[in-house]
Image (cartoon, helix red, strand yellow):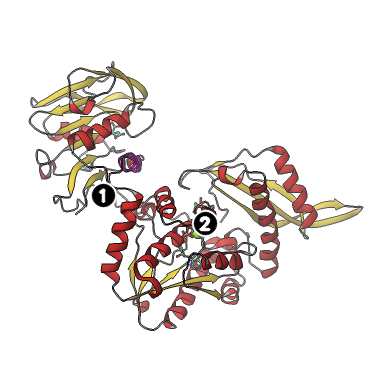
Amino acid sequence: MSEKIIILDFGSQVTQLIARRVRELNIYCEIHPFNKIPTIDESVKGIILSGSPCSVRDEDSPRVDVSLFRGKLPVLGICYGAQLLAFLGGGEVYNSGHREYGRAALKTVAPSPLLEGVSENNQVWMSHGDTIMSIPDDFEVIGSTDDVKYAAFHIKGEQTFGIQFHPEVTHSLEGKTMLKNFVIGVCNCSQDWTADSFVDSTVAALKAQLGDDKVVLGLSGGVDSSVAAVLIHKAIGKNLYCIFVDNGLLRKNEFEDVLESYKNLGLNVKGVNSKDIFYKALEGLTDPEAKRKAIGKAFIDVFDQESHLIEDVKWLGQGTIYPDIIESVSVSGGPSQTIKSHHNVGGLPDYMKLQVVEPLKTLFKDEVRLVGKTLEIPQFILGRHPFPGPGLGIRILGDITAEKVQILQEVDHIFINGLKNRGLYDGVWQAGAMLLPIQSVGVMGDERTYERVVALRAVSSVDGMTADWCHLPYDFLADISNEIINKVKGVNRVVYDISSKPPATIEWE
Ligand SMILES: Nc1ncnc2c1ncn2[C@@H]1O[C@H](COP(=O)(O)OP(=O)(O)OP(=O)(O)O)[C@@H](O)[C@H]1O
Ligand SMILES: O=c1[nH]c(=O)c2[nH+]cn([C@@H]3O[C@H](COP(=O)(O)O)[C@@H](O)[C@H]3O)c2[nH]1
Ligand SMILES: NC(=O)CC[C@H](N)C(=O)O
Ligand SMILES: [Mg+2]
């Protein structure tokens, strides 16, 4: 059984960062909501309690029964997690009257394995409104700042620690060392979780799970489904059936190009031309959510039809990754607002009777790329910008017609190729073009034109949750705009989207 660290999430915005930092040390960890503590067996080497927007002073704040693990295995409480340890242990936590937000200098006041090798006086990042005012007798303070006496503590006779600051953010300059001290020095984790070991153990597990069963998998040409397909293929070979659907909303030449590139990977891929099904389902629809739902349903129909052609298929393979799962579990348990219905082949209707296999569901996107590299998947697939499943269907505002798709494909092609030719593609997280439902007046030669407007969008981001618009060079934008207006019939105006997310989103629909 491979070892792991469990992170209990109390709703902090940066819980995922704790997981990133631990995994960067080649140690596997999992995030679980505070109220869904998994079984703590020998594989669990330590527990980290995250921060939270809540206050331990509130009766309905998220609590856990710390006796489940305190004294039994190493525990590190971060911010709210530390306040909770102090509070439940009999200490006092008050609202300090002002939010302490920003840099602070942490001074070591007692030697501790947690602060091993950390400078006597080091910069940490604070983000809290509550303060621990007194600690129980069996607690010992190990670090203080000018404003916070109990900035780091240790519980005597246990391997339990609490810290008021956030070691997971880069502004805590020696935060990494402290986390390393905890997971390696205190928890004794061996650092053997690597892309190579992931491939080996996952392929072995898939072999055991799938045996001689057949799997059908939707391939999109994107990173996640491609890496999932190659992994499953390594385990079961010809029993993997990949389906790549041409929904009529792909990029220019994408169907042919992607099919061609998969040939070199040895995958058994069937290209299915379902354009008409999608166009028909979209006929007359203008509302973004209605369009998304129609596209999602058409995907399921095509999948259902295709899986019936494969005799005795039992499994559906999916490229679900860790953020897809974490983001769908809300900590408060309260309903969060649906901003956009993401098309997802995951929501399968019962009548399909397929079990789901998701070999990447514990990985972050950059880890998926590393695994892909280990599997020798070519860089042009691994380095691809994300492209939404509903494709150009959510980049053509208003109703969809084959003619509009063709116009947008040309525009998108010029923009994306331009980025590649100028060496800008890899520095941009995602780029694309939108076809707007308006026309504007122009003049070409001596003639008046009354044609369409397109908007170009290029963003930088880490995970798509937030994004900034890219400051692309003006002369590049000028060249692209000229090329689009000169070459694409029906377009006489190009604008550049300078909105960030939030408050805008990346896609326009
Ligand atoms: N044209 C398509 N044909 C078949 N399956 C598709 C198609 N488009 C999307 N899918 C399915 O929907 C899933 C979700 O798409 P999504 O875009 O989130 O992931 P991806 O394409 O694998 O990776 P990336 O996020 O890098 O684009 C894919 O993993 C794939 O299984
Ligand atoms: O597979 C997908 N199915 C969808 O329905 C979908 N909608 C948005 N996206 C992608 O998600 C990221 C964030 O997009 P938004 O800021 O527009 O919500 C961006 O990368 C978007 O391209 C989708 N991907
Ligand atoms: N970042 C945190 O965990 C903050 C904890 C608590 N909500 C406070 O303001 O003190
Ligand atoms: Mg995709």
Residue 456 in picture, x, y percent from top left:
65, 49
- Dots 1 and 2: beta carbons under 8 Å? no
Q: Is residue 20 magenta?
A: yes
In the rendering, at what x and y percent does residue 143 appear? Answer: 22, 21
Label 1 CB-ligand 3 distance < 8 A: no
Please name the residue shown 51% across and 56% down the image: 378
Position of 347 compared to 108: left or right? right
> Badge 1 is on which residue?
32
Question: On screen, 426 above or below 486?
Answer: above
Q: Quadrant of the N terminus?
A: bottom left
Q: Position of residue 304 (x, y in %)?
A: 44, 78
Magenta residues, start to end: 16-24
Residue type at numbered disc 1 = His
Which residue corresponds to mark 2?
381
- Which picture quadrant has residue 424? top right
Q: Nearer the viewer, residue 83 or 386?
A: 386
Viewer-closest of 159 and 502: 159
Closest to the observer, 226 or 154: 226
